[in-house]
Each structure stands twice: as structure tokens, then as C-alpha cells.
Image (tube, rainbow, N blue to C red):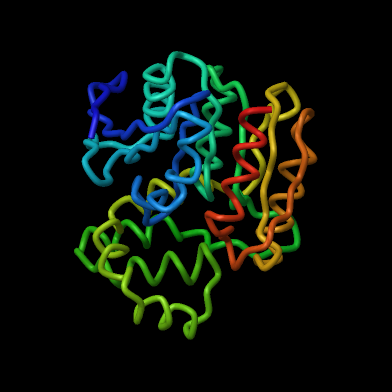
Amino acid sequence: MRKVVSRDGTTIAYKKAGEGPPLVMLGGGFRDHSVFDSLVPLLTPYCTTYVYDRRGRGESGDSPHYAIAREVEDLTAVIEEAGGQAAVFGGSTGGILSLETALAGAGISRLALLEPPYRMPGFAGPPADFAERLRELLAQERRSEASEYFLAHLVGFSQGEIDQWKSGPMWAANEAMAHTLPYDAALCGDGRLPEGLASLEVESVVISSDQTGGWLLAAAQATAAALPNCRHLTLPGVWHKVPPEVLAPALVEFVTA
């Protein structure tokens, strides 16, 4: 992977592929750049893709003390590698980070978000001590329990849904990435939309799956409504995910229009 040094000296690893206008992509909780492995080949005939490992993941470095501002600087550094102006696609908490980076004034030419997980009124959020308890579990190296706790109390999974995830092939990778879950929890914050969205004039689209959860749909609709130059697009998919063969044409159309 290629490397770029973020403002605080942390090395951020990324992959570049394709031809065409630049598109930087970043994922959410439990994920590194490989979450886009099946999407990138569908985009590269039309876009130059930049997929990167958020700090603490994959081949990227980390720093002792997390701050959202550091992750904003990381994404900004990758945008600079793409020429200083790029479209950005952020999935889940990666979408929240993309919005924070746009608010910070980075060179984002177009902004595509997949279900940023804000928590709208009427939908219960995590307990008040959620972040503290999550850090405690990780400090005790109880990675599996921390992952389950995150899924139960932030994502809202039932025990049956958690058990299904644990029986799948990705659980070991989820546990390996568990130390970064406090980063995603910090991005979610108190669940409210960030201030200043009405000032973002960048052309935007918020994408939802037609099979996603009610709270995620409400968040997507509210995010799209808060952005002045944005539309809400619903595509066929499953919970919190749109398959690459459906997502890719929508992204290509948006980025190359």
C-alpha cells in the first residue's frame, strides 16, 4: 500500500486504482480498506479510487490519544494525495467522518454518504456510560465482549443477531479491529446531527438500503434534509448495506456527472 503522513505524524496507508475523477472511500466500524475490495473493480473504469485504512486499522499507524480532529486530518491528507480536490464516499461512521471533514473545509468536490448512524429523536440510543464501559472491556483485552457490547448498545442488535454475526467468517476480523470501536463511538457522539450542515454547499447524496433499520433510515432522511444541496437515494440492499453491483452505478453517475 502507498503511505501518506498525516498532520500529527501518523502514517496512513491507502491504495490507488483506476482512471478518471478521484473518489476517496472510507468505511465504518470493524472495517479497513478491504471492505471495498468488491466495489473498487466496478468503479475503476470510470474513477480513480483511493481506499484507505483509517488510523488504528490495517497498515495505518495510530496515536496514543484519539481525537476526531486527527481522523479529519487523515482524510484530508488522502484527499491531498488525490490532488487536493476529490469526491468522497463514506459508509456508516465513515460517513460521519466525511461530513466532519467537509465541515472542516477540506477539498471535497462531491459527497456521498451511506447511512451515517446519527440517532434521531424517538429512537433509543446507547446508555450514558457506553463509551466508558467499552473502554473498560478493551483495557481488559475482552475484545469479543467489547464487540458484542458495541453491537448490542450502539448498533441495536438483538442477542440472536449478535450470535449470527459471531458464527460468521468475519468475527475474528471484528475482534481484531475492536480497539478502534471507541473511535466510532466518538464519531457518533450523542447521536445528534452536527451543527453547520446548512452551510455545506457541496453537492451531496445520502444513500439508504431499502431493507435497512428504521433508525438508520430516519438518520439518512434527516441528514439529507439538513444539507442544502443534497438528495436522498434509496437502493435495493440488506440491513445497512447496498451490494456493490447496485452501489457502483449510482456512485459512478454521481461522481462523473
From the top left corner, tell me how far across and down residue 100 is, in percent. Answer: 55, 31
From the top left corner, tell me how far across and down residue 157 is, in percent. Answer: 52, 74
Total marks shown come to 0
Q: Of 110 and 192, which appears nearest the observer? A: 110
Seen in the picture, residue 6 relative to 167 is either above or below; the reply is above
From the top left corner, tell me how far across and down residue 130 is, in percent. Answer: 45, 60
| Residue at 41% over, 83% down | 163
Quadrant of the snapshot with the N terminus: top left
| Residue at 25% over, 22% down | 5
| Residue at 67% over, 68% down | 211
Residue lying at the far front in this picture: please name it: 45
Report the side of 230 relative to 139 (left or right): right
From the top left corner, tell me how far across and down residue 78 is, in percent. Answer: 38, 25
Q: Of 207 and 246, which appears nearest the observer? A: 246
Seen in the picture, residue 93 relative to 253 is either above or below; the reply is below
| Residue at 61% over, 40% down | 251
Report the side of 241 relative to 210 (left or right): left
Quadrant of the snapshot with the C terminus: top right
Q: Of 25 and 147, which appears nearest the observer? A: 25
